[in-house]
Amino acid sequence: QVQLVESGGGLVQAGDSLTLSCAASGLTFSNYRMGWFRQAPGREREFVANVNRAGGLDYYHKSVKGRFTISRDNTKDTVFLQMNNLQPDDTAVYYCAANSKPGLVSERKIYEYWGQGTQVTVSS
């Protein structure tokens, strides 16, 4: 049974930093590209970042590029999202997801497995 478990969310002030973690089990982690998505109240779930299988290639939504960094540790089956200079617009539930098939990494439909999410709230 595949499980993706996010952690590290919380309540912070604008300008603060947080690091999210997503621990994977039940799959061969290094075979999967890993992504982070987020969903704010009343909005669709949107792409945040993706990292390739080896960890050497990453992609970001333009709204977080330069502030967020995705990374992975294949020895620990974990993917991270370092978030700096957080802003109120970053408030959302953050989800990690795993993908093993070809496709556009920003599209939700290509991801086979999802975590339950972790809440990030940024106050102004």
Image (cartoon, helix red, strand yellow):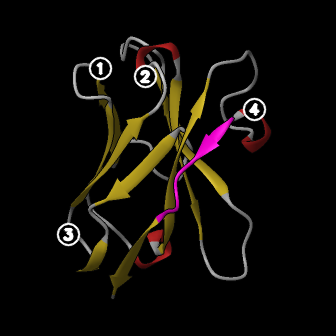
101 to 24, vertically: above or below? above
3 to 40, vertically: above or below? above
Whichever of labels 2 and 3 marks the residue nearer the N terminus, that label is 3
**Mark 3–mark 1 distance (CA, rounded to whole Å):** 27 Å
Tag 4 secondary structure: helix
Where is mark 3, residue-wise? 16
Say which of 114 and 122 sits in front. 114
Tag 2 secondary structure: helix
Asked whether the residues under the numbered discs 4 and 2 touch, taking CB atoms below 8 Å apart as contact, a structural biologist would say no
Q: Type of residue at label 2?
A: Phe
Where is mark 1, residue-wise? 74
| Residue 122 in picture, x, y percent from top left | 35, 80
Question: Crowding near pointer 4: few (<14 within 10 Å), some, many (20+)?
Answer: some
Q: Type of residue at label 4?
A: Ile
Q: Check residue 113 for magenta coloring.
A: yes
**Mark 2–mark 1 distance (CA, rounded to whole Å):** 7 Å
What are the residue bounds of the magenta stretch?
Answer: 112-117
Whichever of labels 2 and 1 marks the residue nearer the N terminus, that label is 2
Answer with the quarter of the image where residue 99 lies.
top right
Numbered tag placed on residue 29 in the rendering: 2
Whichever of labels 4 and 3 marks the residue nearer the N terminus, that label is 3
Where is mark 4, residue-wise? 110
Left or right: residue 16 compared with residue 119: left
| Residue 54 in picture, x, y percent from top left | 38, 11
